[in-house]
Image (cartoon, helix red, strand yellow):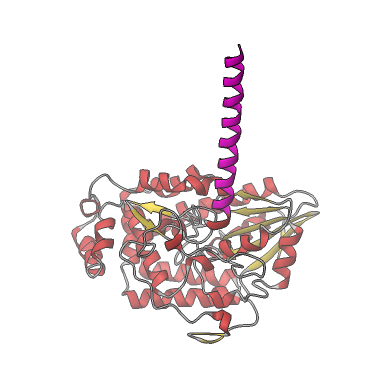
Amino acid sequence: MLEATAARRFARRQRRSGRRAALKLRAWVWRQGRTARAAMGAALALAVALGPSLDRPLRLAGASNAAGSPGLQGSRTFMPRAFGAGAAANTPGVRPPVPASRLPGSSSGGSLPGFHSPPPVQSYASGTTAGGPVRTQPARMPFYVATRGTTTIYLLGTLHVGDPVDYPPNQPFRAPILAALNASPTLALELSPDDLLVSQDDVSKYGVCRRPCLEQMLPEPLWAKLAARLRGNPEALAEIRKMKPWLASLLVETYDSLSAGLQTEYGTEAQLQNVYLRLKGRRVVGLERLGEQMRAFTSLNLAQQREMLAQDLAQTPAQNLADVQTLLRLWRVGDADAIAAWETARTEKLSHDQRVAASVDNRIVYERNRRFVARMQQYAGPNKPLFVAIGALHLGGRKGVLQLLRQRGFTVDPG
């Protein structure tokens, strides 16, 4: 009897110890994992994201990938259809993000296979960057306030990767955004932190083949164009051979955004949570579940996946880089409808098949917009404001989140 009692006590202590260890691990991931996101992270917003910013670096076919917003945290990566996150990394009193190379599971040579980032700019803490003096005011960012009676929803359009100059250390966001965060008991991202923690497994399961498969899934001219694009990057080419076309598309887009000198730790969701997590008694939720987000991509047929990749390869890297910079400028202005109009025009210019391109946008942007709005209304309540941070390309346009809220009786004003 005594031995049985002692055994039960020992088992209870072990369970308590295991729970404490799990809580410590979760807290560590919460604090540290907000920096880098897998390529799909920035892209899909399964982080995000692409995403938001709480997941550990995702591994893709054995390589560490840093993205966003993705995590997979958001719609597509930074450039086309999701334009993910970012907000307050160097807020006073907030521990700055840990470089991806120092996080568990990251490779020492960088976060994307074969990707070598541009030379780092001078630290903006010294008052200058490679582009000149540091801004003293944060970027405007697309920010809106939707009200219906006593229900209020604050909406911030995010970028999954960003520029540190957009987040001055003393005030990473405009005063109205900070006030809205302070007033909101709940922050809604594209994916919840719990989903972000497990997102890498689903990416590998549904987006990566056991053996090279991409070349067989693409028409010869498209494969030749992709191979030529990555000819100087054999490590990336070896990884991408194992991907399905939708995931290969996201990786190509992520390379373009990172090549522009943007950094995953300055994605809006990552920065935003540095501010929000300092507040007491708050919660962070997801507007869609991991399975729902993954199905937006895995349910694409082969023609749709090929269309995604063909658009990414329709221009030269220099032209794609110029598009990244244009989109960043529009985001800094803060007009969601202008961003949506620019993206629509870009898609029309680059699409190989307009009908197929429209079906892709419907699946990975517009259907998700409707889901986002439905979930927002579940989380928001009378006198309980909800702060929403989602990819900026989800907000504007005829089928965007702002218009959907207007159709449901909300008054939507710039913040």
Q: Residue furthest bottom?
A: 132
Reply above or below: 331 against 304.
below
Q: Quadrant of residue 93?
A: bottom right
Per the image, is 271 magenta? no
Q: x, y percentage for residue 108?
A: 36, 62
Per the image, is 12 magenta? yes
Reply above or below: 297 against 68.
above
Q: Nearer the viewer, residue 234 or 240?
A: 234
Q: x, y percentage for residue 305?
A: 34, 54
Residue 396 visible to the viewer: no
Q: x, y percentage for residue 47?
A: 50, 54
Side of 218 relative to 346 (left or right): left
Residue 326 visible to the viewer: yes
Side of 267 relative to 214 (left or right): right
Q: Nearer the viewer, residue 219 or 102?
A: 102
Q: x, y percentage for residue 97?
A: 54, 64
| Residue that appears at 55% across and 46% down | 25
Task: State whether the magenta stretch is mostly helix, strand or loop.
Answer: helix
Side of 277 relative to 257 (left or right): right
Q: Which residues are magenta?
A: 1-30
The C terminus - image quarter: bottom right
| Residue that appears at 58% across and 84% down | 134
| Residue that appears at 45% across and 51% down | 363
The N terminus - image quarter: top right
